[in-house]
Amino acid sequence: MKTHILGYPRIGSKRELKKACEQYWAGKISEKELKEVGNRIKSHNWNLQKEAGIDLISSNDFSFYDQVLDMSLTVNAIPERYKKLDFKSNLDLYFAMARGHQKNNIDVPAMEMTKWFDTNYHFIVPEFKKDQQFNLFSTKIINEYKEAKKQGIDTKPVLISPVSYLLLGKEKEEGFNRIDLISNLLPVYFKVLNELEEAGAKWVQFDEPLLALDLTEKEKYTIKQVYKQIQKKFPKLKIIVATYFEGLQDNLKLAVNLPIHTLHLDLVRNPNQLQDVLNNTPKNLSISLGIVDGRNVWKNDYQQSLATVQKAVEVLGKNRVLISTSCSLLHVPCDLDSENNEAILNLEIKNWLAFAKQKVNEVVILKQLFLDDTTEKSKNIILKNRKDISSKKTSTLINNPKVKARVATISNEHTKRDNPFSTRKILQKKALHLPLYPTTTIGSFPQTKEVRSWRNKFKKGEISQNEYEELLELETRKAINWQEEIGLDVLVHGEFERNDMVEYFGEQLNGFVFTKFGWVQSYGSRCVKPPIIFGDVSRPNPMTVKWTKFAQSLTSKLVKGMLTGPVTILQWSFVRNDQDRSVTCNQIALAIRDEVKDLEKAGIQIIQIDEPAIREGLPLRKTDWQNYLKWAIDAFKIASSGIHDETQIHTHMCYSEFNDIIQNIADMDADVITIECSRSQMELLDAFADFKYPNEIGPGVYDIHSPRVPNKDEMVLLLKKAKKVIPENLLWVNPDCGLKTRGWDETKKALTEMVTAAKILREKT
Ligand code: GLN
Ligand code: ZN
């Protein structure tokens, strides 16, 4: 029986890699110094696994930016626009592809980035041309194997498989299917495998996440052919094929019959597939049991995991079973031991958690316990684990009978406004007195250095709560005055009191906890620190009423209340694993519902509930979509329906495609939806137009991701385009998203132009 993990976080437990990369980009450290930081992290991760007693230690799970981009460099899938730039170092070429380059007369944008399946990790999308040729360009995989070997560690290199690599990419020309590039690509993989074998490698892990998703017949066939050829050329290499994030389902027969050494299963996401796999496993195949959760932060339940191991061993025998994490540990924070501030993370809750380092230990312990659970030490470990797991089940910190009882009373009534939109529209028109093409913004205004420094000082106790709030009041007042001045119709308070749109609410809700170092890589050097939802969620006090009311008191114009929706709060947190996600989501929805009602009571007539994460919560398999969409959309409606018809509900979504979920978006029945639209030149609106979307829409008229100031003519053009497909009495005028990353100067200029653009359109009608 062997143990392994699919990969370890590479950012460093104190975000060392992030800091070093950013210093390198700023020209403050040399390439050599950056590489030394990388080497230290690799070495640390290898030794951590070695000392824990992991049998197959991963290499090539390290990356300076992204593992898919690493593969593009390995196989020389470098787009011409970067190649021709003639960088002195390949690292600079690599970073230019990752993040663009604007220095020394070179100006080239970054390659496209997209989400890694249903995680919050983003990878750089490979680009392919029709006659794409590949050859071995970067030898990173081989170098890292050798580097570890020099340190006395014989690793298992981890590679994204050739088929998954191609499928994750994009065709940049018409007239071909990228899967057909496999015959050009495979020889490069052979070369890599050859060199690895020559250097002494015995195991290689191919990540094949697409094997757990919907595949075409051609893709299935190609997967089969690829492993056949690999097996033929490298009969001695022990190949592990790693699937994760879903179950094999209809690909099961294909997967178990691949000519490989080991098939890895994600048994956290899909525990039920084990029985099917065991029923179908041919004689020589080993199975790697992904039983330690690589996507979430909870301690493993040893009893349950050991039962799974037992089940597999009964069919396969010990030698054909491996114990592992469900997926790479890239998606969890590094080390729980760093969390030693009880005021932030209390001991009872900490005791339920395991981060990457702890999960490595769990994998090893599971093997030890399985092989011998009779020693005194084993017995104690099992006993303690059982105690921790059951304390989590019964803790009063987690269980709030009142919340559970309230969720149980949710009925259809909670998901309905009093009257349909057609009626509400008339009532709202009377109540709100808005012009045609009403102008607004998405919520946040620039979070300047000063604003952030006030919060830091307040958190450190350097200024009092009073002083902090006075500063925020001043900033809010300035924002309101200024919005009035330029003539916006619906104002916002600016969100200066918020660090982050999820954290701000999590900090005020029961059932959430935060960490100090719980960073997870989002992309490149960007990390996020998701809150942990550990218990029943409830709202002890109003969360936004004070600031919204304050802002409204400063103006006779309408101020829009600003909330984050239940699905987005859920999606951007680590969620408890002891109840269905939909139940947790409903608990959050009820808390937001109460907030919406309180805002209405306080006289706020427009309330926006942001749901940018609805789309990214979609399950990976299409067959699971409707179930998710049902509870997710219902949660939004629970949050938004407890008010009078006169009160106008807005929602906001960024970077979404809407075509295949437009019915569900309509089901949300928000009175107004604002969407990110300008980069697609209003193309995203077509989904709404084709559907004859009945409610009001604010298609973003300028891109807030760049400091560039658009002029009124561009926006008039976009609005005219919008008007062609959406009735103008349904249109709003607003930027693409919140403005918190922008500076005041460009914000003021851009919004002034925007207001003028709206006026021009009004005059034309
Ligand atoms: N109200 C939020 C803001 O303006 C919305 C952010 C988002 O959609 N990601 O910052
Ligand atoms: Zn947005």
Image (tube, rainbow, N blue to C red):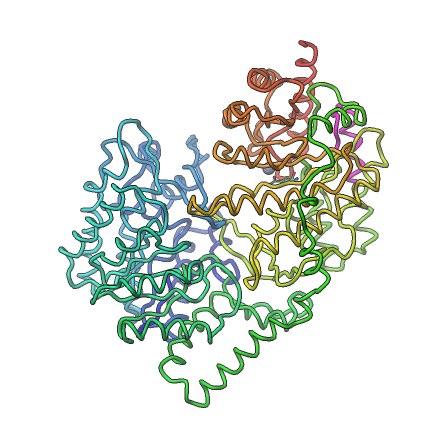
Q: Position of residue 396 (x, y in %)?
A: 69, 70
- Given residues 464 and 298, the one toward you in this image is 298
Q: Where is residue 671 in the image (x, y as percent from the top left)?
A: 68, 31
Q: In the displayed structure, does residue 308 sit left or right of residue 497?
A: left
Q: Where is residue 636 in the image (x, y as percent from the top left)?
A: 64, 43
Ligand 2 picture quarter: top right
Q: Indicate yes or no whether the magenta region holds residue 302.
A: no
Magenta-drawn stretch, dominant element (helix, strand or loop): helix
Give the number of callouts. 0
The quarter of the picture where residue 232 lies is bottom left
In the rendered image, is residue 225 in sight?
yes
Q: In the displayed structure, does residue 640 sit left or right of residue 370?
A: right
Which residue appears at 35% of the width and 65% of the height?
Answer: 275
Q: In the displayed structure, does residue 285 sit left or right of residue 666?
A: left
Q: In the displayed structure, does residue 318 sit left or right of residue 441?
A: left
Q: Give the range drawn in magenta.
A: 474-491
Which residue appears at 37% of the width and 50% of the height?
Answer: 67
Q: Position of residue 267 (x, y in %)?
A: 41, 62
Vertical side of 294 occupied by 123: above or below? above
The quarter of the picture where residue 474 lies is top right
- Residue occupying the far left of the picture: 232
- Given residues 702 and 285, the one toward you in this image is 285
